[in-house]
Amino acid sequence: MYRTNVSEVREIKTPHGKRVRWLIPREVGAKNFEMRYFTITNESQPSEESHPWEHQVFVLSGKGIIQSGDTEITVGPGDAIYIAPDEPHLVKNEPNQVFTFLCMIPAGYEDRVKG
């Protein structure tokens, strides 16, 4: 068993200003997926991304916008979102909102950005 607290995990700032904490990384024995905690603020710059793996997102606080192609949805606390492999997506906060969410991805797929 492994336990941590978000306050105990080092925060990494992405090149676009998002803040991420790897809560359950592969390095602690997670063989199938990893859990990350994201914070997006007005300082973050939205960037469209596409990856060959799925994302599972659970919104914790604030309001955000998730865009894929011509589809744009507003999300808030309690919402769960599935983003398919290779689906272009952009995640941003609503203005003046601190937007936090959990994002699960397959283990090892983003090791290069752990810092």
Image (cartoon, rainbow, N blue to C red):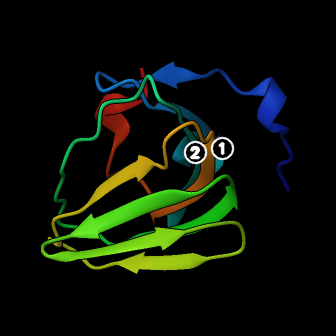
Q: Is mark 2 in CB contact (under 8 Å) with mark 1?
A: yes
> With respect to residue 37, does 10 lie above or below?
above
| Residue underneath mark 2 | 25
Q: In screen coordinates, is 111 left or right of 11? A: left
Secondary structure under tag 1 reads helix
**Does 107 sit above or below residue 58?**
above
Identify the residue at horizontal 63%, vertical 66% (top origin): 76
Quadrant placement of the N terminus: bottom right
> Which residue is pictured at 24% across the width and 62% down the height?
89
Amino acid found under the numbered disc labelled 2: Pro
Mark 2 falls on what kind of element? loop
**Dot in front, 2 or 1:** 2
Vertical comparison of 2 with 14: above or below: below
> Label 1 is placed on what type of residue?
Val
| Residue corresponding to mark 1 | 28
Identify the residue shown where x is 60% and y is 42%: 97
In terms of depth relative to the viewer, which is nearer, 21 or 48?
48
Location of residue 41 in the rendering, given as x and y in whole percent from the top left corner: 52, 32
Q: Position of residue 61 (x, y in %)?
A: 71, 54
Question: Residue at left 49%, top 49%?
Answer: 94
Q: Position of residue 5 (x, y in %)?
A: 85, 38
Question: Which of the 4 image quadrants contains residue 22?
Answer: top right
Per the rendering, the mark at residue 63 is: none
Quick check: 96 left or right of 68? right
* CA neighbours of label 2 inside 10 A, class few (<14), some (14 to 19), many (20+): some
Structural distance between the alpha carbons of marks 2 and 1 = 6 Å
Q: Is residue 53 shown above or below 18?
A: below
Residue 109 image position (x, y, % from top left): 32, 52
Local crowd size for mark 1, using a 10 Å CA cut-off: few (<14), some (14–19), many (≥20): few
